[in-house]
Image: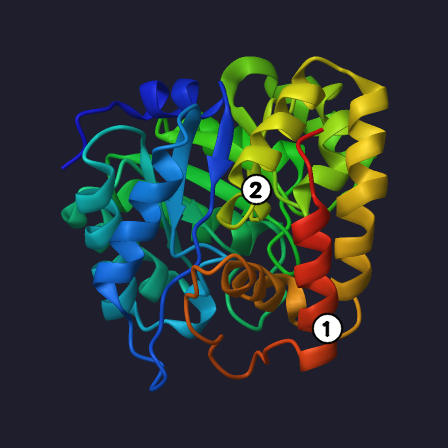
Amino acid sequence: MSNLSPKETAAILAKGLLSFPVTHFDAQMRFQEGPYREHCDWLLNFGRLTGLFCAGGTGEVFSLTPNEVFDVTKAAVAATQGRVPVIAGAGYGTAIAVEMAKNAEKAGADGILLLPPYLMFPNQEGMVAHIDAVCKSVSIAVIVYNRDNGVINEDSLARLCERNPNLVGFKDGVGDIELMMRVYAKMGDRLTYIGGLPTAETFALPYLEMGVTTYSSAIFNFLPEWALAFYDAVRAKDQAKVIKGMQEFVLPYIAIRNENKGYAVSIVKAGMTAIGRPAGPVRPPLTDLNADQFARLKKLIEAAKPV
């Protein structure tokens, strides 16, 4: 069980860069606990991370069974050893999300990242009921991931925060600047705000102006020093360094990612293979990069220098 209160968890997350490790599979698509724990430890040894999000989007939570999410969470907690908060993914329908949240708390996680529900496009009342049920099922922190079919507005968020003191975070994966400003204007410092658009580095500087002090870096999996230097440039509002990093790495990286659907995770695992730290394939229905794409990505990584 976590030793941190939800507010303490949120305060720690807001102060630095967040790590979203991939989930390691063998050739038969089975979870590999040893390599996964070693990878989490490797990431944390670079220092200055303020949170580790296990079985999130980059960790292929959508490809894992609830029992596997529990196993991944236990492994992350064991690897982290209290150095930073561990936040575990939960999602699908309300009943499964509640079960996953309870299991995460049992595994020792400090919080929940609540991803959108499966398949349906619920209205605001339905979303409020869904999030409310998950918040009330645990005592640890809950962070709502606003994206895709799981978008809530500022009024719904305010109602949920009144009912649930452990709802302490709002992760934006929509990119609607007006909505983000409405949320921040209404909620202020009641919440910790996390950038969660794919390749979050792209949006980090403008989002900082809207109170989003941190973001989820998938790139940290294979270029941790680069990711930390880029984050420092963002927090310093060094536009020249940020643009340089965008031009030299982020935008060419995104161009490869955009060549096929579902590559947001595939390209991260390919990046790990490129640096000699393979994490196995992605699970179907995702597909891995082809040989040409991998070669171009490896060349890009080899040329990358801290901004």
Q: Which residue is mark 1?
A: 293
In the rendered image, residue 284, in percent from the top left (x then y), is placed at 51, 83
- Residue 19 vs residue 123: left or right? left
Residue 55 percent coordinates (x, y): 38, 57
In the displayed structure image, the side of residue 297 where residue 56 appears, left or right: left
User: Quick one: 233 or 140, which is closer to the camera?
Assistant: 233
**Three-letter amino acid code at the position of disc 2:** Ser
Q: Which residue is mark 2?
A: 217
- How was this image coloured? rainbow
Measured as percent of width and height from the top left, residue 129 is found at 45, 50
Q: Is residue 290 left or right of residue 86?
A: right
Which residue is rendered at x = 35% and y = 73% of the image?
Answer: 25
Decide which of 150, 21 is in the foreground and name it.
21
Residue 86 vs 11, above or below: the answer is below
Count of marks overlaid on the render: 2
Distance between the alpha carbons at the discs numbered 1 and 2: 21 Å
Q: Is residue 264 above or below residue 202?
A: below
| Image-quadrant location for residue 35 | bottom left
Q: Residues within 10 Å of mark 1 (few under 14, many from 20)?
A: some
| Residue at 79%, 24% in the rendered image | 241
Q: Quadrant of residue 70?
A: bottom left
For the N terminus, the quadrant is top left
Q: Is 184 located above or below residue 38 in the figure?
A: above
